[in-house]
Image: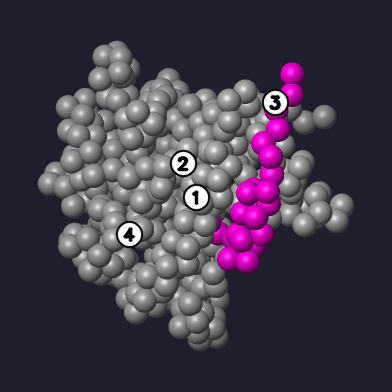
């Protein structure tokens, strides 16, 4: 019998793998499952972007190994998009790095900054990969609890002085997954000043910046003076252009930090297929109407889900951004227990807040990436369901 690494024993099942397994089992048994589980856009990739892929796939040079740092045209397209969207100037040769999806870059980033025994400041609840990457690098996560009372923002004065001195990186993510919280530019500036004071690298995950409601538009940390001195921002085409399956993201920011991430990637992956880079160039530099169309669709879904949850008696904040509704569970239930009862009694899948850390307990996350008719079916089931008493 082979002996496996200790780190494998530290890994919990990735929540969305488990959710997919549960859905498959229920459907195999004949259940009509409505899933609000995984944040995977059901809206197709826009046709002009697909057309560019089809053309590029016929070009023989695109059948060969790509370069780890991407096509020069790809890096220029990313810089162009940041200039158009955020009025931020980036050097495409030194301050931009294409990624095989933002998740890949986030997972690899820990190896750039952390050695065994080092400390990363990681929010909780949060996207699990921040802490998992830290663990893979042999470092420790110091949890920054996020609370409703503080708008799901870190409370920096609660970080012990010895932890602040030891920390090498801080992870932030706004608009936030799973809470849907947003951060103002003042909030991000506060985080940057804290990191600069303590010589901490700032790593900001901005994957949901293009899903904003009721006129809200998220900013970039790169808009703040001095951000490039200590920061990387991770972004993705997945939610913006409905391209989760194509795996295209980017990191931008400090040139030395970009170089470090490139060095890790060059030893661990072979870059992004060039045909996918070409379709991504078309996405970033072409018409942006699809973003507004997406938001229109998600706005209806958000409002319908909020309506259903409110009728159930759950007090829910209306999200200003992201693809998620973060809802408290009724008294007497854990988040996992409530999610299990929903699945058992209504065939509805939601994600327990505890999947995102200990401070996610007491909440469930509902994703809006489900077709309208299925959202309506799910909401009708929620509204007609009488919340049961907790099992003793």
Q: Which of marks 1 and 2 is nearer the N terminus?
A: 1
Which residue is denoted by mark 2 in the rendering? 316
In the rendered image, residue 53, in percent from the top left (x then y), is placed at 51, 79
Which mark is first along the chain, 2 or 3?
2
Q: Which comes sooner in the sequence, label 3 or label 4?
A: 4
Q: Where is residue 245 in the image (x, y as percent from the top left)?
A: 57, 64
What is the secondary structure assignment of the residue under circle 2?
Answer: loop
Which is nearer the N-term, disc 4 or disc 2?
4
Circles 1 and 2: CB atoms closer than 8 Å = yes
**Residue visible at 33% across and 35% down?**
151
> Earlier along the polypeptide chain: callout 1 or callout 4?
4
> Which circle's residue, 1 or 3, is located before the other in the chain?
1
Q: What stretch is highlighted in magenta?
A: 368-392
Asked if disc 3 and disc 4 are in contact, CB closer than 8 Å, the reply is no
User: Considering the image in quadrants, where does the N terminus appear?
Assistant: top right
Rendered view: 364 above or below 39: above
Assess whether mark 2 and mark 4 are in contact (beta carbons under 8 angstroms): no
Q: How far apart are marks 1 and 2 (CA)?
A: 7 Å
| x 73%, y 54%: residue | 33
Nearer to me, 100 or 306: 306
Residue holding disc 1 = 306
Q: Residue at x 26, y 14 (%)?
A: 161
Residue 390 badge: 3
Numbered label attached to residue 214: 4
Q: Are marks 1 and 4 in contact (CB under 8 Å)?
A: no
Percent x, y of residue 337: 68, 30
Of the pair 349 and 264, the residue shown nearer to us = 349
- Name the quadrant containing residue 194: top left
Q: What secondary structure is marked by label 4?
A: loop
Judging depth in this view, the residue of 142 and 181 nearest the camera is: 181
Where residue 11 is drawn, which disc sits there?
none
Confirm whether the magenta stretch covers residue 380: yes
């Amino acid at each position: 019998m082979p002996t496996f690494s200790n780190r494998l024993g530290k890994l919990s099942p990735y929540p969305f793998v488990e959710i997919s397994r549960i859905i498959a089992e229920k459907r195999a048994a004949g259940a009509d499952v409505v899933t609000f589980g995984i944040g995977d856009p059901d809206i197709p990739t826009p046709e002009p972007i697909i057309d560019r892929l089809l053309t590029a796939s016929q070009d023989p040079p695109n059948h060969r190994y790509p370069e780890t740092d991407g096509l020069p045209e790809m890096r220029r397209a990313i810089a162009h998009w940041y200039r158009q969207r955020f009025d931020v100037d980036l050097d495409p040769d030194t301050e931009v790095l294409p990624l095989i999806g933002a998740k890949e870059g986030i997972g690899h980033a820990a190896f750039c900054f952390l050695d065994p025994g080092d400390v990363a400041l990681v929010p909780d609840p949060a996207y699990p990969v921040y802490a998992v990457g830290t663990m893979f690098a042999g470092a420790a996560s110091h949890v920054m609890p996020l609370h409703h009372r503080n708008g799901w923002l870190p409370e920096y004065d609660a970080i012990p002085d010895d932890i602040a001195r030891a920390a090498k990186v801080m992870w932030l993510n706004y608009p936030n997954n799973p809470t849907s919280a947003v951060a103002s530019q003042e909030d991000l500036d506060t985080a940057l000043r804290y990191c600069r004071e303590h010589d901490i690298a700032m790593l900001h995950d901005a994957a949901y910046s293009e899903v904003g409601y009721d006129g809200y538009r998220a900013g970039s940390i790169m808009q703040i003076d001095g951000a490039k001195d200590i920061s990387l921002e991770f972004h993705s085409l997945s939610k913006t252009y409905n391209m989760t399956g194509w795996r295209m993201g980017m990191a931008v920011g400090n040139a030395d930090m970009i170089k470090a991430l490139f060095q890790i990637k060059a030893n661990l992956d072979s870059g992004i297929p060039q045909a996918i880079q070409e379709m991504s160039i078309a996405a970033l530099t072409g018409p942006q109407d699809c973003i507004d169309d997406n938001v229109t669709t998600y706005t209806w879904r958000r409002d319908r889900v909020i309506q259903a949850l409110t009728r159930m008696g759950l007090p829910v904040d209306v999200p200003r951004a992201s693809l998620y509704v973060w809802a408290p569970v009724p008294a007497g239930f854990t988040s996992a227990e409530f999610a299990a009862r929903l699945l058992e009694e209504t065939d509805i899948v939601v994600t327990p807040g505890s999947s995102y850390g200990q401070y996610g307990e007491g909440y469930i996350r509902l994703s809006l990436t489900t077709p309208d008719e299925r959202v309506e079916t799910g909401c009708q089931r929620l509204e007609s369901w009488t919340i049961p008493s907790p099992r003793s």
